[in-house]
Amino acid sequence: MKANKHLMMNNDRAQAGIGTLIIFIAMVLVAAVAAAVLIQTSGVLQERAQSTGKQAAQEVSSNLLIKGIEGVRASGSGTTSETVDLLKVKVALNIGSSEIDLNQVVITVTDGDSINDLVYAGNSKAYGDAMTNFSSTASSAANMIVLATENTTDMGNNSRFFFTVEQIRDEDESFSQAEPIMNQGDLVNIYISTVSTTASAGSHTTLDEVALSGLKDSGITVSPRSTVNLILTPEAGSTTSAGFTSPSFGVRKSIALWP
């Protein structure tokens, strides 16, 4: 009797079960979720990097450029003030600068003894009120008169808190008393009242060839050999500063102070 022989077959192929398939699908899903998270995170980081780079470029650049500073003395009744009573700061935008709203610029002026932090006369947010009798439709000369001769209720003399502006060059006619926004090519005069106590007590009737009366003390005194410093701080970008020591005045009503 022959013994039964069992034949063994070698089969290297395996059959995938449902468990293996589930594991495979789970791995694919996990990889897809991880990829989506990475893509989203990289997008957010790229956006933040671009925003931060833009802001950093604005902060390190000097947007405002002071072209010159002229001092004007009040006069009238055959006399001329012993001090400079108005600063005309000629300002333009630096190369590559974006537009600047002068409503957001703060100007700090000091004579070494007193300091005034000035904002645009039409700005009603900085001190809770705009300059009394400021008019967005009036001429720059009219607003300058209000700056030098009037006061704002509950605050005091306008000259201690505000500055006004006059456009010199504005090719696209985008600059106005209501919206003092500077862009490339614009050139403006910023008026800063520096009426001294002595000048306010006098009987002067003219300032920068404009008739007025009743000058108000600014707290700043610009007499011969006075050292004055100006700092212009825009909403974005580095500050711009200028300092000068005033010369002897002689008989001049208008004096170049800087550069």
Image (cartoon, rainbow, N blue to C red):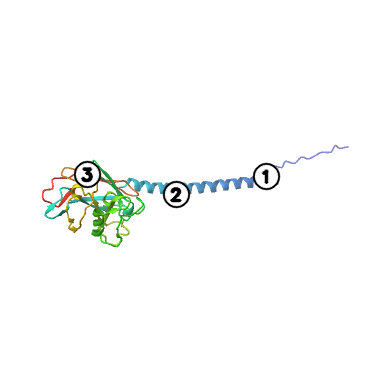
Residue 211 versus residue 18 in the image, above or below: below
Query: Callout 3, which amino acid?
Result: Val
Of residue 228 and residue 64, the one placed in the foreground of this image is: 228
Query: Callout 1, which amino acid?
Result: Thr
**Would you say residue 34 is visible in this rendering?**
yes
Residue 111 versus residue 140 in the image, above or below: above
Please state the horizontal and vertical placement of residue 9, each as a whole percent of the image.
75, 41
Decide: few, some or many residues near mark 1? Use Cα within 10 Å; few <14, some 14-19, many ≥20. Answer: few
Mark 2 and mark 1: Cα distance apart in space: 41 Å
Mark 1 and mark 3: Cα distance apart in space: 83 Å
Q: Who comes first in sequence, dot 1 or dot 3?
A: 1
Q: Who comes first in sequence, dot 2 or dot 1?
A: 1
Residue corresponding to mark 1: 20
Query: Callout 2, which amino acid?
Result: Glu
Please state the horizontal and vertical placement of residue 32, each as a whole percent of the image.
57, 48
Please state the horizontal and vertical placement of residue 102, each as a whole percent of the image.
31, 53
Mark 2 and mark 3: Cα distance apart in space: 44 Å
In the drawing, does residue 39 fall left or right of residue 60? Answer: right
At 59% from the left and 45% from the top, the residue drawn is: 30
Of residue 43 and residue 90, the one placed in the foreground of this image is: 90
Of marks 1 and 3, the one in the foreground: 3
Residue corresponding to mark 3: 228
Residue corresponding to mark 2: 47
Decide: few, some or many residues near mark 3? Use Cα within 10 Å; few <14, some 14-19, many ≥20. Answer: many
Of marks 2 and 3, the one in the foreground: 3
